[in-house]
Image (spheres, coloured by chain):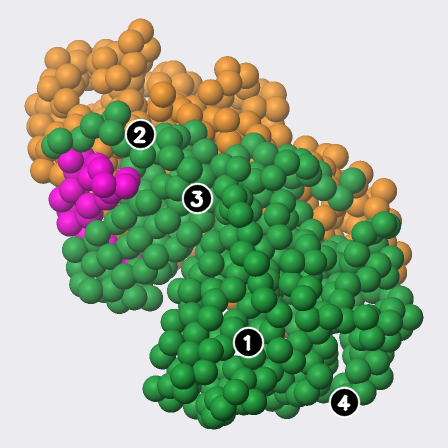
Chain colours: A orange, B green
Amino acid sequence: MSGSVSPLAPTTFATLPPVRGLRMATASAGIKYKNRTDVLMMVFDAPAAVAGVFTKSKCPSAPVDFCRNNLPHGTARAVVVNSGNANAFTGVKGRQATELTAKSAASAVGCSENEVYLASTGVIGEPLDATKFAGVLDQMQSDATGDFWFEAAKAIMTTDTYPKVATRSAEIDGVSVTINGIAKGAGMIAPDMATMLSFVVTDADIAPVALQALLSDGVGPTFNSMTVDSDTSTSDTLMLFATGATAADGQKRVETASDPRLASFRTALNALLKDLALQVVRDGEGATKMLEITVTGAESDAAAKTIALSIANSPLVKTAAAGEDANWGRIVMAVGKAGEMADRDKLAIWFGDVRVAVNGERDAGYSEDAATAVMKRQDIPVKVELGLGEGQATVWTCDLTKEYVAINGDYRS
Amino acid sequence: MSGSVSPLAPTTFATLPPVRGLRMATASAGIKYKNRTDVLMMVFDAPAAVAGVFTKSKCPSAPVDFCRNNLPHGTARAVVVNSGNANAFTGVKGRQATELTAKSAASAVGCSENEVYLASTGVIGEPLDATKFAGVLDQMQSDATGDFWFEAAKAIMTTDTYPKVATRSAEIDGVSVTINGIAKGAGMIAPDMATMLSFVVTDADIAPVALQALLSDGVGPTFNSMTVDSDTSTSDTLMLFATGATAADGQKRVETASDPRLASFRTALNALLKDLALQVVRDGEGATKMLEITVTGAESDAAAKTIALSIANSPLVKTAAAGEDANWGRIVMAVGKAGEMADRDKLAIWFGDVRVAVNGERDAGYSEDAATAVMKRQDIPVKVELGLGEGQATVWTCDLTKEYVAINGDYRS
């Protein structure tokens, strides 16, 4: 792993205000790493509404199973996140580790074990020694403080080259509410080093069922529209908590996602999710370019997304981007292999504002120089118009470089 | 492109006998390359039965459309293959180029244009100047000779590092028949440099409908079970011709694929298709390892194949292979993301004979040294047992190396 920061990293980081009702602390439990923090604890002093979306993997980690089981309960008092060990593919021992961790956290905070949420990233298949948490969680709960977002983002990093933070504000009932979020994932959505985790917290007062609907809707065009290498983790976890602290300012609890008072909140939440998702792509392992791929004119939005992901996951498209090669033939290939309806002779393709192909052949005014100039940018917009219908989608990916192969070809040894 | 031969190349090449009824020639038409042969012509002196399978791309090349249209006619007299230009995404000009080429070939051979088959590989989106064929096909038809297989295999190479040839013999009605085949495709199944083409010819007397059934059945566990980078070409073409010359030896024409007289032929054909397919994988761009991935115990054979391909196409599995890293967690990941039924707690995984995981956790007797020893081989067998049913499949792939990124990151410039 190279020690250098991604060339696509943000030049400044947002400053995140505390969110009333939430305190956080980090600690070094010695799970795997020496001399670095490897545990984050989030403590809600009153039960917070909770929502979550998780990996679609058929082989999920033990913490993912644990969170899914607790979610119907609807409220959270503590979250424990560790790095260094994913507690994935660990069988009965994995379940025992989640139970022991939850018990320790519940005891530290004074809550039920079904108000505890867990997330682990790191090596998979290695039993997680949860007894290491027992000693630290009590101390963390008493140390926890509200002004801790940036430290929290750093504590959950693995191969990330920069911490990922975002904040937005919105209004509900004329009351100002805050939404903060952190994420980790060095772009790779993968099992044993760079699993994607994200935790978002608001002080708004929103019921769990409404919160879940907001999150499930919001994840589609954001976290579920980014890809680095098409590999899906066993541990991907995105959780949204609402402390309800703004009830004290007069905000009346929102019970359903269809409540029109959520308009501003929904916009702010979706913007924050997109912000975090793009930060993950921009930290893609070995990445030197970000590609924004927009497909329009598909038979449906779902078809557009399938085609956009086919382009975004194509090794040939991604290596061409790494080489700054305006190789639009590979876009044609990726559209063709996607399996969705496409009509070669209606297809048009743009790199940035440069139309390179139209009506099933190279644009008559095609300029290799103009197309190459777009490929030399850090952020490369690619647009494909299918000419069939109204379906559209946008996805984000990064290029595929020798550095990606180096990082992933030998990381365990 | 490096000039070196794949480390996985065969040490010897099969010697292919002539197939009665077929003559071949190559020529330099100056399509793109200077000072090298870039056209192959196959001439059948009497109409040969023909079968074909083609890319599933929704954006197929003009020659693929042309061949598909001719196939119902059932017989072939000429095949023209060019490298340097794929005649793909070339609109009306592309169709005109196929028509002109077919007309020239039909005139040279003295047959109908619907007895001509075409294949093109090379840059896509560039109009193909088919007038360049006009001058050479007459000469090729008169020069064509039966003992030309190795030259033919070399003439259709692009980024291939070695020519791909295979031969088998079989018996029908006690009469010995020959099957010869050639293929190209530097492992990458992609649009503009290494499209997969393969041409197989037998002297057996088999009707087109039977020939098509044999080919369609044979391609599933062979050519359609290999992958280098998951990218599907606009031009992939596999054709099978039967000259019927062995009728002169007393072989009675086979009319249907269910004819029991085909047993020996079917076995030989399938072995030849697998031989050629594995040669393509072993020439995968940048490849240093071949992986044979077998999935057993799936709900169905189709589910097993989906899971096997999910493993074979995973950049993380392929980079781990490049690094000789026995990273079985990435196999778990790839099983989990495939979308087919899997039960984490029934899963077992082997590298070679070394069982690394069983019952949803690391094997109690796991030895990193033993697993790593398997990864150091050139050919790495990976086996996954799902424990759900009887479905199984085997697929082949190669590793993902920095050399792959180098070859594909900048080939056009």
Subunit of mark 2? B
Question: Quick one: which residue is furthest to the front in this view?
Answer: B249
Label 1 Cα crowd, 10 Å radius (few <14 / some 14-19 / many 20+): many
Residue A45, magenta (yes or no): no
Taking depth in this image into account, of B281 and B8 the one nearest to the observer is B8
Residue at 54%, 84% (x, y): give it.
B246
* Disc 2 residue type (three-letter): Ala
Residue ID for mark 4: B112
Kindly check if marks 2 and 4 are in contact, taking CB atoms under 8 A apart as contact.
no
Separation of residues labelled 3 and 4 (CA atoms): 44 Å
Work out whether B77 lies above or below B234: below
Instruction: Let me know if residue B254 appears in the view.
Output: yes
Segment colored magenta:
B338-363
Determine which of the numbered discs, if any, sits on residue B202 in the image: 1
* Disc 3 residue type (three-letter): Met
Residue ID for mark 2: B373
* Between marks 1 and 2 in the image, the one whose residue lies nearer the viewer: 1
